[in-house]
Amino acid sequence: MPHIIQAENVSKIYHVGKVDVPALRNATFSVERGEFVSIVGPSGSGKSTLFYILGGLTRATSGRVLIDNVDFAQLSDAKRTALRKSRIGFVFQKFNLLPTLDAMTNIAIAHEIAGRNGDLNREYLDRIVELLGLKGRLHHRPSELSGGEQQRVALARALINHPAIILADEPTGNLDTKNSNVVLNMLRQSNEELGQTVLMITHNPDAAAIGDRTIHMRDGEIVD
């Protein structure tokens, strides 16, 4: 099965005053289309830096990242943004929902931001809503939803444009055990039933176990 994500000797150095601080050192790995891969490591291990580089949200100092054999580093900012919008859905630890908008509008706005022409695919939307157990909650604002429901809305927003890849950064970090299990199972279902490739960053080995395989990081390096 072809690789959908390839990271080749990816390094990131932050310049703090006159000091160079390496956050990532020669990370090399690949993810096959349709895989669910967990990247686990303690705080400061470099996993979030890797997440932002894989998503095209920041540039590596050296090395390269290929998404469907397209090298992010060779793209202009505009083309990199277009690729990110069309191919990648993001789920963050903070739900990042717009507080004045209801759940349905928070989901649909991703369709507008991506510049998709035409109306939402209602059949696909209904499938996502059913999958995530959001039926009956779409007209509630974030303040009227539980933390778990807000994260499910955020996941629906990430899924609505049917991206090939879901990148999730500590998606259960603000949730209790019950809601964490719900969100993890939803990610698993989106992988199995909707065909998305999922790459999840987490500090929790128990959460990481839901993936097909786990990549371990420590001190900016992949160690296993």
Image: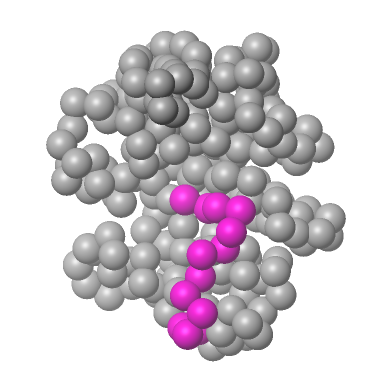
Residue 201 visible somewhere in the drawing: yes
| Image quarter in which the C terminus is found | top right
x and y, in percent, of residue 201 in the image: 61, 37
In the rendered image, the residue lying farthest to the bottom is: 139
- Judge whether residue 99 is colored magenta: yes
Q: Quadrant of the N terminus?
A: top left
Please give the name of the residue rendered at 63% of the width and 26% of the height, measured from the top-left corner: 45
Residue farthest toward the front in the current orientation of the protein = 18
**Is residue 36 among the parts visible in the rendering?**
no
Q: Position of residue 219 (x, y in %)?
A: 63, 18
Question: Could you tell me which residue is drawn at 49 percent across and 45 percent down?
Answer: 166
In the image, farthest residue toward the right:
177
Give the total number of marks visible in the rendering: 0
- Asked which quadrant contains residue 131, the reply is bottom right
Vertical order, 150 against 39 (above or below): below
Residue 117 placement, left or right of 92: left
Q: Is residue 188 above or below residue 162?
A: above
| Residue at image location 71% in from the left, 30% down from the top | 42
Q: Residue at x 45, y 71 (%)?
A: 107
Instruction: Give coordinates of residue 38: x percent, y percent.
Output: 63, 32
Taking depth in this image into account, of 76 and 107 the one nearest to the observer is 76
Give above or below for 131 relative to 98. above
Visual colour scheme: one colour
The question of residue 36 being in magenta is answered with no
Magenta residues (range): 90-102
25, 51: nearer the viewer: 25
Q: Main secondary structure of the magenta part?
A: loop
Q: Horizontal and vertical percent for residue 76?
A: 15, 36
